[in-house]
Image: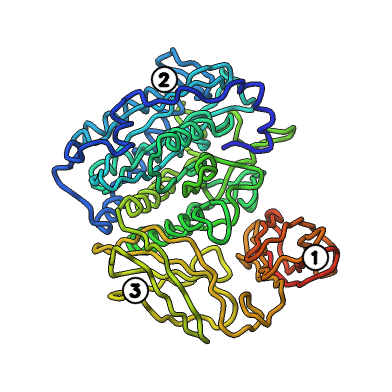
Amino acid sequence: MIRLLALALFTPFLATAQMNILTTNPVAELVLSGNYDPADYAATTVVTDPLAIAADLNVSVSADSLKSYIIRLSEFGTRNSGSDTVSATEGIGAARSWVHEKFEAFSAGNENRHVVSYLQFDQDICGMGQHRNIMAVLPGSNAAEHGIVLIEGHIDSRCDTLCKVTCLAQGVEDNATGTALVMELARVMAKYTFENTIVFLVTTAEEQGLLGANAFAEYIQNNNMPLRAVLNNDVIGGIICGKTSSPPSCPGLNDVDSTGVRLFSAGGYNSPHKQLARFIKLEYRENLLSQVAVPMDVRIMTPEDRTNRGGDHIPFRQRNYPAMRFTAANEHGDASVTPGYSDRQHTSDDVLGVDTDMDGVVDSFFVDFNYLARNAVINGNAAAIAARNVPVPTDFTGARSGDQLTVNIIDPANVGTYRVAIRSTTNDWDTVFTLTGSTTGVFATNPLGPIILSVASVDDQDAESLFTRERIIAPVVSAGEPGAAQEPNIRLLQNRPNPFDEATWISFWINEVPDYGKAEIQITDMQGRVIAQLPVALKEGLNETLYTHGYGVLGTFAYALFVDGRPVDSKQMVFAY
């Protein structure tokens, strides 16, 4: 994964912009554009039931297959984006050819249902002028109402120097794990039928600035292709904590976590990216949790990525496509590669493991293949639901009276069954209700404090659409909540989440923006010492700012809004870990 603070260092290697972005297989572009006959890709046995797909994913995704892919990826020596493209055994050229061949084999084993292609683009990256992503496209069964769901992971690797193209860079955790996950889902999911198209994408040049993902995002945007959701997988199979790690991450050296996975996404209130992360967790909880042997702790994180880090979901978010990132709970390093750095990430030590009995064969692996398989299943299950054509409600309203919430859903499709999601102080939904046989429902809710509401439709196989954007619903009685005439013009709200990880959203409501020169959020400890001062710009309605305190801080702290040096309001928050 890329370290954002180093972006300025990339410019000597990236002398040109991306040009000549194209699919090497023209059929892939036709499918991505919705110009194809679904009958050409129809399965003999049609499997669409979401619970059946979830159950099959749970048994079909193979830890042994994932292990075999990762071992093979490690054997190319390096997969640096500027490495050899001529050799049949070493470098990025040999690696991407092998992935392409595997995608073709997966298709051949499943009635030729995949359309396999490179996405080629021209750009000077580490002295190499032309680059290729690899993709397997599974065409949807409904070209008339075409949409695209993307599962991705980057194949390129690096050692301690960004453009050292001949050093050992097996890149096992970062990111053979993500590549293997995408490959395994392409193999397993080829037998299922989805109304929307799923793209299994392996990108290049992530380490040099998310460039392969940016090329695909630009290609999608320039061709007006209907991308519905992006699931990025980066550093997704390791379970051992390093001496360092970018917060929010692991407690310390050699800590092991084989049941936690982090879902990173941009934004706070009304973010389609956070909504996608919540959707993924909901589908895991409702479709998979009851049948898995090892339950997973799916954690919806506050920031878009780890502190000062980034990944291939970002170019899609920048173009307003819903996008998020899966990352292991524990990482072996923060990628700083500074003097004294002893962790594996972004070094030649990011290898398979160790040979404990000295027989020449690695027998203790740094990647937990069963853990990686569980993360693959979570990905596949969410993508399977997102790839259904369940129409999202066009709008909704909500009103509160005491402890009752009345929701009215506007749905021209008249689907008939809906989900009503409510959250208050966390990144996740507090409650998800089901409304059947009506577009109006009344639900019990906490009478105090504002709640955040969103809705989805449910089809006849009990699968949800993606959820709508969010709306704040305030109580009718003032009680210090936004929206009432008698409340103060500016009201500081409770931070979300609270308690929280290494970051939290601090928000405040403004009925009418006053004349002012300077505004800031001030963070203090319980002794009154100022910890941070965050400049903010005031706007009417809800205002939000992200406060990142870092990992490993515990205790209660205060935050206050100051306008022109005067405190407007203050509240307390809890640092959980």
Q: Amino acid at mark 2?
A: Ala
Q: Is residue 248 above or below residue 82?
A: below
Q: Secondary structure at mark 2?
A: helix
- Viewer-nearest residue: 164 or 490: 490
Q: Amino acid at mark 1?
A: Phe
Circle nearer the viewer, 3 or 1: 3
Q: CA distance from mark 3 to mark 1?
A: 43 Å
- Viewer-nearest residue: 172 or 117: 117
Of marks 3 and 1, which one's residue comes earlier in the chain? 3
Read off the residue under disc 3: 439
Q: CA distance from mark 3 to mark 2?
A: 55 Å
Q: Secondary structure at mark 1?
A: strand
Q: Which mark is residue 94?
A: 2
The residue sitting at 47% across, 46% down in the picture is: 321
Q: Is residue 286 above or below residue 224?
A: below
Q: Residues within 10 Å of mark 3 (few under 14, many from 20)?
A: some
